[in-house]
Amino acid sequence: MKQSKLLLFSILFSICPYVNFGQELAEQVTTFVSVKETIVAIKNVTIIDGTGGDVKYNQDILLRNNKIASIVKTGTKNYPNSTKIIDGTGKTVIPGLIMLHEHLFHAKPFEGNFKATHMTNTFPQLYLAGGVTTMRTAGSIEANTDLNIKNLIDQGKMVGPSMDVSTPHVERLGFVPQLQSLYGDESIENWLNYWFDKGITSVKVYNNISKDDLREIIKFSHAKNIKVTGHLCSITYREAAELGIDNLEHSFMASTDFVGNKKENECVFGEPSLAGLNDNDPKLIALMQLLIDKNVTLTYTPNVFEPFTNREVIPGGGSVALAPYLLEQMQTFYQQQINSKRDSLGLISFKKEMKRVKKFHAMGGKITVGTDPTGTGKTIAGYSNQRLIELLIETGFGIEEAIKLSTLNGATYLGIASKTGTIEVGKEADLVLLLGDLSKDVSNIRNMEIVFKNGIGFDSKKIFDSVKGKVGLH
Ligand SMILES: [Zn+2]
């Protein structure tokens, strides 16, 4: 498998009579619910609220119905007997994670190419178990399946986060057979409207489209108030920003802006040009400023670029989730890769990208995050989302900013920040209770206890346990 390819590739139900906040939940959902009371107080807990503000200690959070009703210093408020009390001593609360580059498929390497296998059953559950209460898919292999999953989750028939479902990757003939979605002279407007009518709420464009394609895609999407994001190659970041794109995936890693003699509309491998680019190169700074001026958000996806050397085989502890035969393949692959020339180059570019992202952030650039569970198949939903918080700390962000990037920033981009994304009075009770003080040790992100989605508390460990050994199969 070539590095270039690695870089480029990036559910029947019985309803039981269980009603929560006006929503009926099916038995296969209620089995994972650990907190269903309508008035809940989490007492004496540490809060990282998603605003980027300082960590707050010894706090009580009161949830009433599906909303955050109050946040006060512990000991200053009494709760009626009907309140379900959760002792938060030694625990931390963060907002539910909002992740913008997710997929409901798992990538299996095959003889130098990829096969994406839909994880209809496991991935939605894993995302929620990993603290994700809202996610955007950034490209679909089975867009209809993704839409059905979204609707079943919304109807209380499946376990999973709220979803913003994107189109299939809008692509002309590339190297991944499952991705090709535009042919010849078909009408882009009709193609988009077909998906918009079905309930698709984001557009994802891919490596091999033309500037003319992108111009039309942006025009017809914006006419319906739908945002466009892209994992680009044939089109440079500068060109896309000037055409009005909203969001670029993989931060700077998919930029072909610095490739010498790049022909218009031609997809060329950009990584060597990035490897040779100084962090303070005026051309890079000018591009960053243009993206800021044009209000383009970058999605940072460090998981999919994480090298092998000195890392877990499946980062984030996800090896327990993988089907045993796939784990065996990954272990063999890991041994082949560590200390290989390719992996050492990967490590250098991984570190360089961290510096670029930090700089863009310091200049005022908008950043959202996501995990992109593709690549070689070692990025596993849920585990990877937790791992991402650790990678943000490795990038150099403080814990408050790392949580903000993973919560409020995603909500702001999706236009839902007035109802979710931070721990503030009046917002929906989307929050995660985890064991330990996250501000002291980021690895506590792996110790999630309860994931509240819209006021309903799910048992994170029980969900993780239920799908062990099944990823890659279901
Ligand atoms: Zn992706």
Image (cartoon, helix red, strand yellow):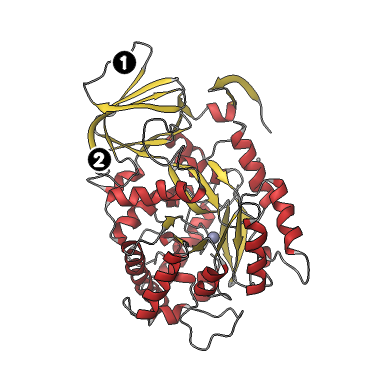
On the image, which quarter does residue 190 sit in?
bottom right
User: Can you tell me whether the CB of the residue at mark 2 lies under 8 Å from the nearest atom of ligand 1?
Assistant: no
Residue type marked 1: Tyr
Tell me residue 437's x, y (percent): 25, 40
Give the residue number, with chain letter if any, for mark 2: 437
Residue 207 badge: none
332 is higher (above) or lower (below) than 145: below
Secondary structure beneath label 1: loop
Residue furthest to the top in view is: 81
Tell me residue 5's x, y (percent): 54, 73
283 is higher (above) or lower (below) than 250: below
Q: Nearer the viewer, residue 419 or 273?
A: 419
170 is higher (above) or lower (below) than 99: below
Quarter, ligand 1? bottom right
Q: Nearer the viewer, residue 398 or 189?
A: 189
Tell me residue 90's x, y (percent): 24, 33
- Find the distance from the CA under tag 1 to the CA under tag 2: 25 Å
368 is higher (above) or lower (below) than 289: above
Residue at 74% x, 53% y is 194
Secondary structure beneath label 2: loop
| Category of crowding for the residue at label 2, using alpha-carbon neighbours closer than 10 angstroms: few (below 14), some (14–19), many (at least 20) | many
Q: Would residue 407 be visible to someone looking at this image?
A: no
Give the residue number, with chain letter if any, for mark 1: 79
User: Can you tell me whether the CB of the residue at mark 1 lies under 8 Å from the nearest atom of ligand 1?
Assistant: no
Q: Nearer the viewer, residue 124 or 352?
A: 352
1 vs 2, front mark: 1
Q: Would residue 10 be visible to someone looking at this image?
A: yes
Residue type marked 2: Asp
Tell me the quarter of the image containing the N terminus.
bottom right
Residue at 34% x, 56% y is 392
Residue at 55% x, 74% y is 233
Asked if residue 331 lies left or right of residue 160, the reply is left
